[in-house]
Image: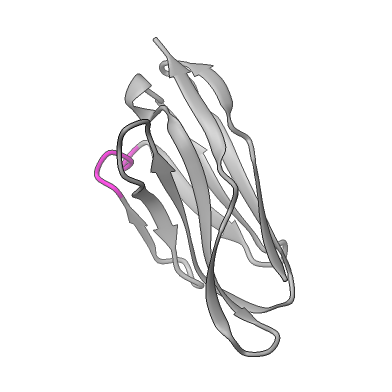
Amino acid sequence: QVQLVESGGGLVQAGGSLRLSCEISGSIFKINAMGWYRQAPGKQRELVAAITDGTNTNYAESAKGRFTISRDNAKNTVYLQMNSLNTEDTAVYYCNANVIKLNMVWREYWGQGTQVTVSS
């Protein structure tokens, strides 16, 4: 079994910062790409940022220059540092990981989501 546990969401004023964390645990052989997605009310889930098992990163246009994704492979944890937040960043943020389990089966996993609310 593999679990993703997110933390770090909350309420912040516009212009503020938050750091999201997602720790992955369980029967893991290797974690490939990891990412953060978000879903605002009435909208589809969208990619915010992704990082490969190396250091290659990819950002949504709305996140470029404000958000930074990083990972600590020793801790099986991915982070999302969010700066200069605005009200349009309000959403539930989901962690995503592509995991090769100990039985060599590949599978994609999602966290339970953490609410980020930015007030004006």
User: In which quadrant of the rendered image does the N terminus lie?
Assistant: bottom right
Total numbered labels placed on residues in the image: 0
Left or right of residue 6: residue 34: left
The residue at 41%/58% (across/down) is: 50
Give the x, y percent position of residue 39: 39, 40
Q: Which residues are magenta?
A: 60-65
**Quadrant of res 62:** top left
The residue at the far top in this view is 120
Q: Is residue 82 above or below residue 75?
A: above
40 inside magenta stretch: no
Q: Is residue 66 above or below residue 31?
A: above
The residue at the far bottom in this view is 104
Q: Is residue 71 above or below residue 44?
A: below
The residue at 57%/38% (across/down) is: 114
- What's the image's color scheme? one colour
Give the x, y percent position of residue 8: 63, 35
The kind of secondary structure the magenta stretch mainly shows is loop
Please tell me which residue lies in front, 4 or 22.
4
The residue at the far front in this view is 42
The residue at 54%/82% (across/down) is: 106
Give the x, y percent position of residue 68: 45, 45
**Quadrant of res 77:** bottom right
Q: Is residue 106 above or below residue 38?
A: below
Give the x, y percent position of residue 97: 53, 64
User: In which quadrant of the rendered image does the C terminus lie?
Assistant: top left
Left or right of residue 104: residue 85: left
